[in-house]
Image: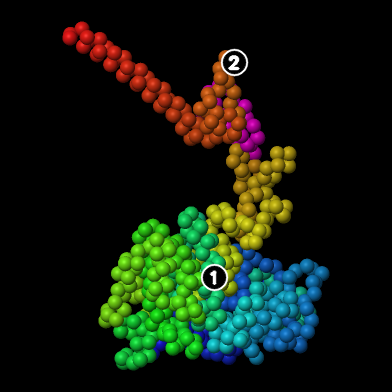
Amino acid sequence: MPRPLLQLAAGLLWFLTDSPAALAGEWIVETHSLTVRSPASIAGTEDAAIGDFGVPLYGASMLSEVIRSTDNTLACQPFNNHVSQEPNGLPQVLLAERGGCYFIEKAYNAEKAGFKGVLIYDNVDERLLTMAAPEDRPEIAKLADDITIPTALLTHAVGQKLADAIKRGDSVVVELDFKESMAHPDDRVEWEFWTSSNDACGAGCDRQSLFKSEFAETAISLDKRGYTQFTPHYMVQRCLDNSRSQTRADNCINHGRYCAMDSIPTELQGRYKGRQVIEENKRQLCIRHQAEAKHQAWLWWTYVQLFNQNCKMGSNTFDNACAETQIQACNLSIATVQDCMGDSDADEDHFLLKAELEQQGTESIGGAAGRVVLLPTVVINNRQYRGHLDTVSITKALCSAFDETTEPEVCLTGNIQEDDCASGSQNCWRNETLNVDACIDTYRGYKCQCPEGWRGNGQQCEDIDECLDDFACDHTCINLPGSYRCECDEGFNLSEFLSQMGLTFQAASWWSVALASGAAALLAVLAGYAIQRFRIRQEMHDEVREIM
């Protein structure tokens, strides 16, 4: 018998302050580094578990002062006073002990008081866990929409150490470092989005639908240009009721092999059942399958965007007819999709849904990315994302997963990150006279790298004298800062072809010079060949005239 996702999630994550652990070793706890800078007596680096609400600072770090309230130590009540800016100028993060209320309530109260982050420490000695919103309490879970600061859980030992230092009167300064929280091995990011076609299961479904619509344009652009490799996934479960019950008939297909994970609200259950959700999930997997075969995998985004806009349970359009209209709008084959979907009443596996069941870790523990137990779940470079599901937050997380200097330009726009090179705080080489420097802005900060035509380590750069290269120019080479110029001896004119190759006014690499020279030589050979053929044909014509 399938259970609503909210009940499943409540059994897998700790929502309440006194809930027991579940599935140890299967649910991956994503962490960031917390380095205590002062006082020296407790300095060191510890792990902090990233909360599943709030906005992690992926790819960045924040030096901050830790504050603990004396009259609201659990942070379960709104704070009477707003945080004031301290003389040291550091942002302040709240330290609160676990207990008394939901994690998300503590974070909400901290943000409303003006804190720039919240650190909650456990009240018992145990392993780190992932703090999540209580989805079975929607009135509490909706507070997540208003939390935009980083949230993290500390072990009891680490938190108590900070609390004791504050109690002694020490100024506790820590660095929250998220730079390595997301793997960033190369110039392409692989990411997954575990979702559902259900648009009526509550706040979680609303967030997914809105995200699909708003992020589609960015996702399509990144995928088309080869910056990302995206894969959509859908959570399914096997029926726990082996009988031919009405529950299984309403919520499952293929004789109970695949059942919907998310619930249908009571007011819509007369028209919709979980079976229709799992059918649409299967359809969307088949659409992705067909789009990949056409080498246009991004058409999945186009379809789900159209489906979310036009096919809604609330308007009684969540059905096959509406879905097929959107398939046609994407220039995809309805027949191919139907063939892929197969017979949902057949007592057999479906190749795509079977793969989803295996990949989410339901039948076996997942890989390095961990077991997928919540909707929505985003996995980036095999790391589970934590935080808001919105365009800006996901874009920042994706940007943090590129190797430095390989990120797309969207990662360097103003609403995603600040230009560290423009701030003047970097220590890269700069020539004020020429207005040229070695600073390259990246999502994580900046990188010092000498510009083209210069060499060095980025802190120090010197001009490359291209004129020392024998291939630079045919006649006279004049070296310029970061470049060079070719000039002809008296009585010669610079080749127009070479001029168009850019060899007169800007620096060129040896291979471009060789290419230009080779092209010129090829033109000369072709011209000689044409002349020779003309001569041979003329001679043959003369000989024929002589014998005829």
Residue 304 pos. (x, y %): 46, 69
- Residue 100 showing in the rendered view: yes
Q: Residue 441 appears at what percent x and percent y?
A: 63, 53
Residue at 41%, 71% (x, y): give it. Answer: 323
Local secondary structure at mark 2: loop
First-in-chain label (2 vs 1): 1
Q: Do the residues labelled 2 and 1 touch (CB within 8 Å)?
A: no
Residue at the left extreme, as displayed:
548
Q: What kind of residue is marked 1?
A: Phe
Q: In this view, does 184 lie to the left or right of 326?
A: right
Quarter of the rendering occupied by the C terminus: top left
Residue 58 appears in the figure: no
Mark in front: 2 vs 1: 1
Q: Considering only vertical position in the picture, is 506 above or below 221?
A: above
Q: Which quarter of the figure has residue 55?
A: bottom right
Bounds of the magenta segment:
462-483
The answer to whether 460 appears left or right of 275 in the picture is: right
Q: Does the magenta stretch include residue 96?
A: no
